[in-house]
Amino acid sequence: MSSKNVFMKLFFGGIIFLFAVALAYTTANYFYTEAGPTHSSVYWFTLMIAGVIYILLGVVVSSVFPVSLGFLFSADVLILHTLGAKYGEIPDPAKTALVAIVLIILYVFAWKKLGDNQSSISAAPENVSQIAQ
Amino acid sequence: MELLAFVLVWPFLILALGLVGIAAWSWSGAFLTLPWLWAFILIILVWIVFLGRARNIGQGKSSIEQLALVRRGVIAISIAALLPTFARYAVQSLHTSLPGVIFALIFGFWMMLWGMMMRDRRMLMYGNIIGGAFTVLYAYSWLWELGEFSRIFATAFGLAAAVGIAFFKLKDKLTS
């Protein structure tokens, strides 16, 4: 990634991250208030949906790193918060599947991209500096 | 596609590490209270610190290379922690039955063996060996609880695995 305009990239990435997280929480709060206190699952469901939407947005705009990373990191926050709050209620087969999917993705990435003989920079595509500029 | 993988890697690694933390937190009621497990974790941590100091890992490297080292470390730690987590949920999904525990035992041994046979992917090697060892310990702790027959199976399987590794993998080193 190019080192040009680092401050601007960090600033915009941070702003997008903060606004994305804030939007998700305010929306979830709104739906929770509308549905009533007996429907607390609406709150977590909204956060999860927002997390999924942010992942899709991050993938779609992946050529603009700060915007993409802002969305993806805010999706991390939302998904981890939801998982942390509702983890005990998830049935064991679903937990097994979730951990298996994460493990498979880790193995595939490590196998394809991070061999000992590959240089650290080779994890980045060749045209990345041009795109980042 | 390559660009997408490059952008997704850190958010995904943080997600994986977060999942490890959440799973570990949910375990704290039972498994993490076992004293032998804490001793095992302590030994591994001390070993990693001494290994890092002895080899001067990260010294003389650029910030990008150091970041890549951190990334490898995160992947190794995530795999080492998620393997026993997966085994635990798989065993619970099968209602802690003997076939489920045997599956966890074979899975743990298989991962350890795979880690031992790795040549040019050290982070996978460490992750598989440590994660496999935790999985085997977890499976053995359950096998011991399930009665006499499962204890016989546990000891027989351990013996067979040790003999198998000695013959097929370490024969040259053991006979020289």
Image (cartoon, rainbow, N blue to C red):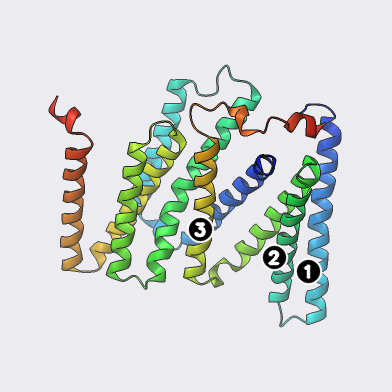
- Please tell me whether residue A92 is drawn above or below residue B135 in the rendered image: below
| Secondary structure of residue under mark 3 | helix
Q: Residue furthest left?
A: B175
Which badge, 1 or 3, is on the more N-terminal residue? 1
Label 3 marks a residue whose chain is: A
Q: Quadrant of residue A39?
A: bottom right
Residue B74 on image: x %, y %:
54, 40
Q: Residue furthest top?
A: B60
Q: Which residue is mark 1?
A: A28
Q: Nearer the viewer, mark 2 or mark 1?
A: 2
In the image, A89 versus A128, the foreground residue is A128
Instruction: Look at the image and tell me whether residue B66 can be seen.
Output: no
Quarter of the image that includes the C terminus of chain A: top right
Q: Which residue is mark 2?
A: A48
Q: Quadrant of residue A8?
A: top right
State left or right for residue B56 relative to residue A37: left
Could you tell me the amino acid type at mark 3? Val
Residue B99 on image: x %, y %:
29, 68
Which badge, 2 or 1, is on the more N-terminal residue? 1
Residues flagged by tags 2 and 3 on a common chain: yes
Which badge, 2 or 3, is on the more N-terminal residue? 2
Could you tell me the amino acid type at mark 1? Ala
